[in-house]
Image (cartoon, rainbow, N blue to C red):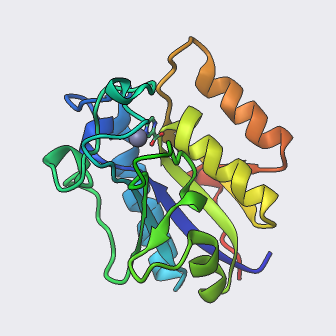
Amino acid sequence: MGTGALLLVDVQNDFCPGGALAVGSGDEVVAPLNEYIARFTAAGLPVLASRDWHPAQTVHFEAGGGLWPAHCVQDTPGAAFHADLQLPDGAVIVTKGDDPGEDAYSVFQGHAAGGAGAAEALRELGVEHLFVGGLATDYCVRSTVLDGLRGGFGATVLLDAIRGVNVAAGDAERAIAEMVEAGAAVTTLGRLTLPE
Ligand code: VGL
Ligand code: ZN
């Protein structure tokens, strides 16, 4: 399978209960993700965390003609990672959505601290397969997994560590079916086997 990495998508306060764009039970991904982090770290595998990181004005927000109320505005508490998320030392942070002209749902539209695109940063780490959890199933998780598969990465969706926005009922379930149809595998903590 090649080297695997854990990718935590947008585990930020604004996507959790009380946040500006709260995903139902969004905070319930934190405990399982901490267990995934422990397993990947113990196996010496890389951990990456993306963050939605918008300017105050962007085409992504309703005020700019987009779909969403303002959320994850750069350097605000809502944009911070959930306080209970145990990011390991050396986690690679991928920033996305900072261009005011795009939605940037996919982590592959993001960049690491040094400016390298996400795909480039993954290749530098020797990563060929992504294990993806976080928020939200029907937007950034979906878009990232589909983009990764198109870009030649393998992908496994962590079913016990994702939650959906469900703008329409069933969106998250449909997104999972779409990812599987496109070639993604699925797993849970109980069934996880890591690449050697
Ligand atoms: C997301 C809606 C708007 C996500 C980001 O992280 O899934 N969804 N911005
Ligand atoms: Zn956003």
Q: Nearer the viewer, residue 118 or 10?
A: 118
Quadrant of residue 84 in the image?
bottom left
As displayed, is residue 7 above or below residue 67?
below
Quadrant of residue 67 in the image?
top left
Quadrant of residue 142 in the image?
top right
Residue 170: x %, y % from top left: 62, 16
Residue occupying image coordinates x 57% and y 45% = 141
Q: Is residue 9 left or right of residue 153?
A: left
Residue 93: x %, y % from top left: 39, 70
Residue occupying image coordinates x 77% and y 50% = 184
Q: Quadrant of the C terminus?
A: bottom right
Residue 77: x %, y % from top left: 14, 48
Q: Is residue 186 left or right of residue 111?
A: right
- The answer to whether residue 8 of the structure is visible from this angle is yes
Q: Nearer the viewer, residue 146 or 26?
A: 146
Q: Nearer the viewer, residue 190 or 108?
A: 108
- The answer to whether residue 159 of the structure is visible from this angle is no
Residue occupying image coordinates x 33% and y 75% = 88
Q: Is residue 63 left or right of residue 3?
A: left
Residue occupying image coordinates x 67% and y 51% = 145
Q: Quadrant of ligand 1?
A: top left
